[in-house]
Image (cartoon, grey):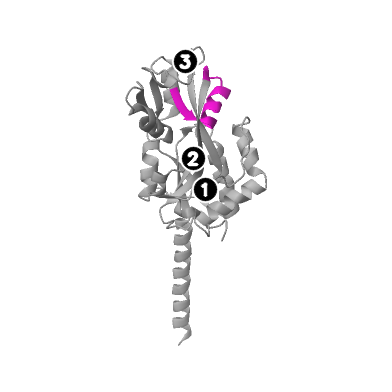
Amino acid sequence: MNKTLRATLAGAALLVGTAAAGAEAMAEKLVAGVEAAFPPWAYVEDGEYKGIAIDAMREIAKKQDMDVEFKDLPWPSLIPALAKGRIDLLVTGLNVTPKRAKALDFSIPWWENDDEVLVPEDSDKNVVTALCCGATVGAQGGATQFDWLETNLAEKDGVGLELRGYEDYVTAVEDMLAGRLDSVVTSTDTAEDFIAKGRPIKIVGTIQQNQPQALAVQSGDPKNLLAKLNKGIMAIYEDGTWAKIVKRYAPQSSIREIPTSMPDYVDSYEEPIPGYSE
């Protein structure tokens, strides 16, 4: 083989290798879907994404060499967007449920929540009258709170509850304060965040749920993200970064041990768990 041909082939190989590396680098750009109206987990302030899930994902990305950009989507479109591969992962206060486990794969859970019944500060309603007897109750459409209210109260004869769905909890609380709702049911951390920020509302009761929350990826984990996410979650938990992030946005919250409870209906919690027990 003459020198000219060898040089040509070497150059071609270099170009192919460079192109492949460039394509791989481009492929590593991950789009994380968020609902930026769900404090303290994800919201926008002064044009910047903030919140527990946002800051935690940034730290996980640093530790796992992941290139992640956030994309704000309305809550009802987030899970379908991930299921269809339009985004790569879902980063918010996402509850783990049997229905969602059929469509998504979950990281190890990093939080656990109950639900709270909110009423205006000057309301005389209690946990019973806020959820029955002609009460109009708001919750985020498609959220676990909405599903629970619909199944356990709204569809039951004799309860007398009118349920209204909202795109986000900020709007639901505003409607309640404007007199269009009697109560709102949301997660404990979101309820506490509203109160900490001075909203004239109060908690009149707790619905015990012990609901785990996690990050999510497309079913089957086609981009092999679960191992990185799980390693990253454990890394920020063990070095104290997670506690600092939680206290930054929810100083009243206690730090739960990670992972929290892992339901046996979730396929990605079967041993060996990628990046955690393998």
The numbered mark at residue 262 is 1
The numbered mark at residue 92 is 2
Which circle's residue, 2 or 3, is located before the other in the chain? Answer: 2
Which circle's residue, 1 or 3, is located before the other in the chain? Answer: 3
Foreground: 77 or 7? 77
**Residue drawn at the location 53% of the way across and 36% of the way down:** 113
Pick the quarter of the image with the C terminus.
Answer: bottom right
Q: Depth-wise, is mark 2 or mark 1 nearer the camera?
A: 1
* Callout 1 secondary element: loop
* Mark 3 burial class by Cα count in 10 Å: few <14, some 14-19, many 20+: some
Cα distance in 3D space between marks 1 and 3:
36 Å
Cα distance in 3D space between marks 2 and 1:
18 Å
* Callout 3 secondary element: loop
Q: Report if residue 46 is visible in the image.
A: no
| Residue ID for mark 3 | 125
**Residue 243 at what x, y percent from top left?**
64, 40
| Residue 120 sits inside the magenta stretch | no
- The kind of residue on which mark 1 rests is Met
Q: Depth-wise, is mark 2 or mark 3 nearer the camera?
A: 3
* Mark 2 burial class by Cα count in 10 Å: few <14, some 14-19, many 20+: many
**Residue 97 at what x, y percent from top left?**
43, 43
**Residue drawn at the location 53% of the way across and 24% of the way down:** 194
